[in-house]
Image: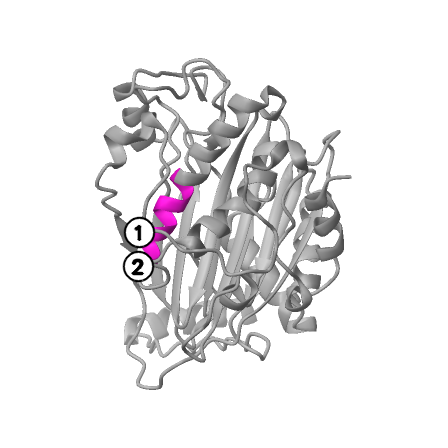
Amino acid sequence: MEASEEIGRLENGSSSRSGRPPNPPTAADRTGLTNDRVVVPRKKSLVRHASLVKTTTALDVSVEPVLGVGNHETEFVPVVRSGAWADIGLRPTMEDVFLCVDNFMSDYGLKNLIDEPSAFYGMFDGHGGKHAADFASCHLPRFITEDEEFPQEIERVVASAFLQTDSAFAEACSLDAALASGTTALAALVFGRRLVVANVGDCRAVLCRRGKAIEMSRDHKPVCSKEKKRIEASGGYVYDGYLNGQLNVARALGDWHVEGMKGADGGPLSAEPELMSTKLTEEDEFLIIACDGVWDVFMSQNAVDFARRRLQEHNDPVMCSKDLVDEALKRKSGDNLAVVVVCFQSQPPPNLIAPRSRVQRSFSAEGLRELQSFLDSLGN
């Protein structure tokens, strides 16, 4: 049994507060990073595959802010607690991997200089095998914490870590062809009041802001106009909703073995993440991170409404994650299922009271006469 599979089993049904980062994959998956609890020398230099040089030399990170945050005089500090659940579903093998680290800095050997939350949550949906998902879940957070500009430059560091992970996996696959596979990847980081989400593929993160669903990521499907335009400019094409007629995602880590996807001169399959960020306030209640098997049967607002009701009942992010997975199974999702729920408050979500309508209604004299005539006719 692989180490990551063992940890995934332990996390099901238990809070992440007692969780630890995953052990590295088996010997065939390792590329030299150690699992010993020591402070690894932090570096600024990047490891990039040649195919990434054209588009990411300067690494200009575009971060889309999430609007809708009101003015709040009180300085809100989130109380972070999380839980996760996964199920193989109707598939013969399990290729989803999740990661919950509520104390990111300390768990990865860094000193947290401020008394505020530092957390990392990841969702990795593998395809063509689980090796890429296992590899990314182990190495992505390490590349983040080993960068000397972390956490001061979170967005730049996270974007770079995605590309480094993709490049490192390419090198691993060149040494062992049995690792050939790919994975989507979504990472959510909480530092103080800041929430930063980076995504490649079709996992999704949805923030509940006072009962309203705020999507913190976009699904990277080949049919999306923005992705289709990028794919065609990179020499690829979209056929029947699939990238080059083979993949149903436009961005992913790995897949170096698939002809025409990635190469020395680039390719249509991108590993560059799209980032969104927001400043958390007391209106922000929880975050749902899930693989596409969940979103196949849940709309974002529907998932928020469902999770909110469950949290009002038991206020347990582990049970809430399980409830979402169980409901997706009831709704006949045909994929692997994995959910992470991150709560930002110690109390359950409050009841929302809809304001009463203040619309004034009146009848004209003519209308009153017609009504009286109608009532009189009923009496005859």
Q: Quadrant of the C terminus?
A: bottom right
Residue sitting at 32 percent across and 58 percent down? 149
Give residue 84's position: percent from left, percent from top: 65, 56
- Compared with residue 185, is residue 147 higher up or lower down, i.e. above or below? below
Q: Which mark is residue 153?
A: 2
Give residue 119's position: percent from left, percent from top: 50, 64
According to the picture, the residue beneath numbered tag 1 turns out to be 156
Residue sitting at 36 percent across and 16 percent down? 237
The amino acid at mark 2 is: Glu
Give residue 29's position: percent from left, percent from top: 61, 34
Whether residue 274 appears in this view of the structure is no
**Left/right of residue 86 with respect to residue 207 in the rendered view:** right
Q: What is the span of residues highlighted in magenta in the rendered image?
A: 154-163
| Residue 156 inside the magenta-drawn segment | yes
Residue 74 falls in image quadrant: bottom left
**Left/right of residue 68 with respect to residue 174 in the rendered view:** left
| Residue 39 inside the magenta-drawn segment | no
**CB of mark 2 within 8 Å of CB of mark 1?**
yes
| Observer-nearest of 343 and 360 | 343
Residue sitting at 46 percent across and 15 percent down? 245
Q: Secondary structure at mark 2?
A: loop
Q: Secondary structure at mark 1?
A: helix
Residue sitting at 71 percent across and 51 percent down? 7
| Observer-nearest of 283 and 180 | 180
Instruction: Calculate the distance from the C-alpha at mark 2 to the C-alpha at mark 1.
Output: 6 Å
